[in-house]
Image (tube, rainbow, N blue to C red):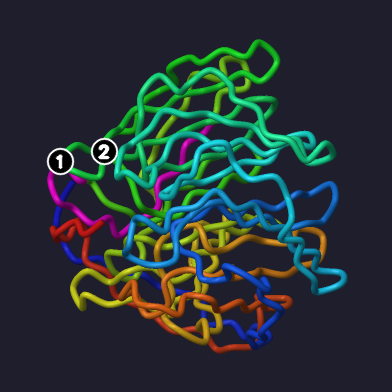
Amino acid sequence: MSRTAVLLCICTSLIVAQTWESYSSPSINDDRILHATVYDTDSDVIYMIGGCANHNWNTINYYVYAYDPSTDTWNTSLSVMPTARAFIQGAYWDGKIYVAAGMNPYSQIVSAFEVYDIAADTWSSLAAIPGSRAGHGTVAHDGNIYVIGGSDLQANGYATVYRYNIASSTWSGATSLPQAWEMGGCAIWDNVIYLCGGYNRNDTTTYDHIWSGTIDAGNPDNITWTQIEPLPFPTGYCGATAMDGHIYILGGFDESARAGIKQFLAYQISMNSLIQLTEYPIAITRNHMVTARRGHDQVYGVAGDANGNYSLPNNFYYKIDDPLGINETQALTATADNVLAVYP
C-alpha cells in the first residue's frame, strides 16, 4: 500500500450534538482494562468480563459483571471465568457469551475457549482455538464465532482467522487477512466484519484505515477482505461497536503523539463515510471498552485505560444517547500507512 497523503472528508451537514453522561460503576473491582465488553441483545444487559486493573499483569482476573441499563445497577456476584484472561474480546449468540484465547496472569498466551450460559450462570470449556493468541477480534454471525488476527504479544502478529461452528462444536480456518492485525476495534454489522485501526506487529505498522470482511452466505469460511475508509490518523487500541448501520469507533492510542485520545467517530456504512461525534470526556484506550445498546440508540463506554498511561484509576463509565447529533462536522486529514512502533 502507498504512503501518500489522503484527505478524509466528513459531511458538513448538521447533526444533533449530544453529551456523554456518567452512569453507575461496579461497587468492587471497577478498574478494568483489556477486558471483554459484550451486549446481550435479548436481555438488554452489558457484560464486563476479565481484564486487569493496570499494567501489572498479576491483576489479570476472571470476574464477570453484568450491568442492567434499565435500573443503572451492576451484578458483581456472577460465576467467574475458568481461566483468568486479558487482551480478550467476547461475542454473544443465543443466550451465551463466547470468549477465546488471551493472556493469563503468568504472561502466557493461551488457547482456551470458554462459553458462559447466561441463564444458568455457568461456564464451560470448549475445544481450544487452533492457535493461541491475544489482542484479537471476536464476532458472532449466523451460528458461528469468528476469531480474527491477534498476536503473541512478543514478535509475531497473525493474519489468520478461525471460525467456530456452534452447532457442530468444530473449528475451521476462514480466509486470512491480507496482513497481520491486532489491538484495534472489531465489530460486525449484517454479514460484514469491520476492523478499525490496530497494528501489524510484523512490520510495526499502525493502521490508519478500516478493513471490511464480507462473509459469503454460501460458504462461511470465505471472507472477502477490503481496505475501505481511512481514519483521521493511525490509531491503535481503539474500541468499536455496531448499531443501526453505523460502526462507532471510540478512543484509541495516537502513536505519533504517544498518548490516548478522546476521538469518537461513526462510520456510516451506506455512505462509506466517517462522521466526527462528541468527544469522550477523557482520553480512553486499550481496546474493547465500548458497546452499543441496540434498540435504545445508546453507546456505552465501559472502563478502559484512562489517558492511555496504564495508571489507576481506570474506572470511568460514560454513556451517550442518540450519538448522531447537531454538531457541525469537520474535515480531517489522514496519512496512509504511517509506520510507527507497536506498543502493547
Residue 288 lies, in percent from the top left, at 50, 57
- How far apart are the alpha carbons under marks 1 and 2? 7 Å
Residue 270 appears in the picture as rendered: no
Given the image, on which type of amino acid does mark 2 rest?
A: Asp
Residue 4 appears in the picture as rendered: yes
Residue located 69% across and 25% down the image:
143
Quarter of the rendering containing residue 101? top left
Residue located 57% across and 43% down the image:
90
Q: Looking at this view, is 69 or 66 the one in front?
A: 66
Give the magenta range.
Answer: 201-214
Classify 10 Å Cα crowding around label 1: few (below 14), some (14-19), many (20 and above): few
Residue, disc 1: 155
Q: Looking at this view, is 230 or 110 the one in front?
A: 110
Given the image, on which type of amino acid does mark 1 rest?
A: Ala
Quadrant location, the C terminus? bottom left
Residue, disc 2: 152
